[in-house]
Image (cartoon, rainbow, N blue to C red):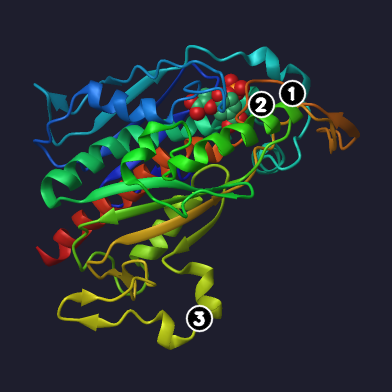
Amino acid sequence: MSFNTFGLMFRVTTFGESHGPAIGCVIDGCPPGLEITPQEIRAALERRATGRSRHTSQRREKDDVQILSGWFEGRTTGTPIALLIENTDARSRDYDEIMRQFRPGHADYTYWKKYGMRDYRGGGRSSARETTMRVAAGALARKWLNLELGVDIQGWLAQLGPLRTDEVVEWDSIDGNPFFCPNPGMVRELESYMDALRKSGDSVGARVNVIARNVPAGLGAPVYGKLDADLASAMMSINAAKGVEIGAGFASVSQKGTEHRDEMTKKGFLSNHAGGILGGISSGQDIVVSTAFKPTSSLRLPCRGLDVDGEEVEIVTKGRHDPCVGIRATPIVEAMMALVLMDHVLRHRAQNG
Ligand code: EPS
């Protein structure tokens, strides 16, 4: 049981480590005939890449994706699609000093406990690098969903540390700044906050939201295949994710039933506290998911920790780390939304025709 595969009908298996020779994925179950080019996948990857601004990791990867199979004359063939990206800018010596140490707040410790060994270079598969192939696979799902059903998926930064960033939402501005911030009036404040944070050597968490529009009603199954459960699982599977809310989420706790219920009229629902999902099945309303990302645990500020012999050591992490991994998470949550919806559309068709 190794669990590197995601989805039932649109199945994505990812492989590779941050500092290994390459990362890749195999997508099985993609419908034939989808027109897609490597350039389209590269464009999706570019939005997630490191080094796009001074506010993210300065590692420079080209993410030059190759399509190795399942694609002929510009279209998917229905056979397994293999995608591969070579790692070209890993600097493994940065990790020499923590080879035998566990960074507090990092998966170093639990990987060691589980496997009795770990690829300490760049965190191996616990690295944000692993999310690259989710975005690559997500590009196919997203395109298919849009062409087939008109589904439109958009993510945004909702909060960075203490700064709420979506009190004003201008959809067209999201891709025009390095934070995926929908409020152009907040960008300067975000820049100053991040510049000071980077200087201090610390890191911070973030909240990233995603909305899917034009999702047909009826996706998801009543009990064990709930659409919201699968979305929550998908978002929680992103490295550094610590919480997921669907619709009103934890705000539902303090709501009254009269407030939470989304009243229905001939013109449609009057609100969307359900986040587009009722009883695990899509209602046809927008699907809204919010994901919390923890602060990056790889810090140059010294802290107390243990080594593999159980000895107390002072830990300092070198490397080119993101001071806020949530800044790059918007394309990742969009990809996970696309992958889950695609899988559920195919599941729905398999049962209901
Ligand atoms: C990461 C640490 C940095 C990031 C990396 C995620 O890499 P390195 O191990 O080389 O210092 O650059 O992100 C990517 C390479 C990427 O493509 O997302 C980490 O510890 O998660």
Q: Residues within 10 Å of mark 2 (few under 14, many from 20)?
A: many
Left or right, 335 with reference to 20: left
- Residue beneath label 1, please? 99
The picture quadrant where one finds residue 219 is bottom left
- Residue beneath label 3, please? 255
Question: Hey, which residue is sitting farthest front in the picture?
Answer: 185
Q: What is the C-alpha distance between the residues marked 3 and 1?
A: 49 Å
Task: Write the residue at 17% across / 34% down.
Answer: 79
Label 1–label 2 contact, CB within 8 A: yes
Q: Residues within 10 Å of mark 3 (few under 14, many from 20)?
A: few
- The picture quadrant for ligand 1 comes to top right
- Residue beneath label 2, please? 120
Dot 1 or dot 2: first in sequence order is 1
The picture quadrant where one finds residue 322 is top right
Dot 3 or dot 1: first in sequence order is 1
- Type of amino acid at the residue the image marks with label 3: Gln
Left or right, 107 with reference to 227: right
Count up the numbered dots.
Answer: 3
Which of the image's four quarters has the C terminus? bottom left
Asked whether 255 or 135 is in front, the reply is 255
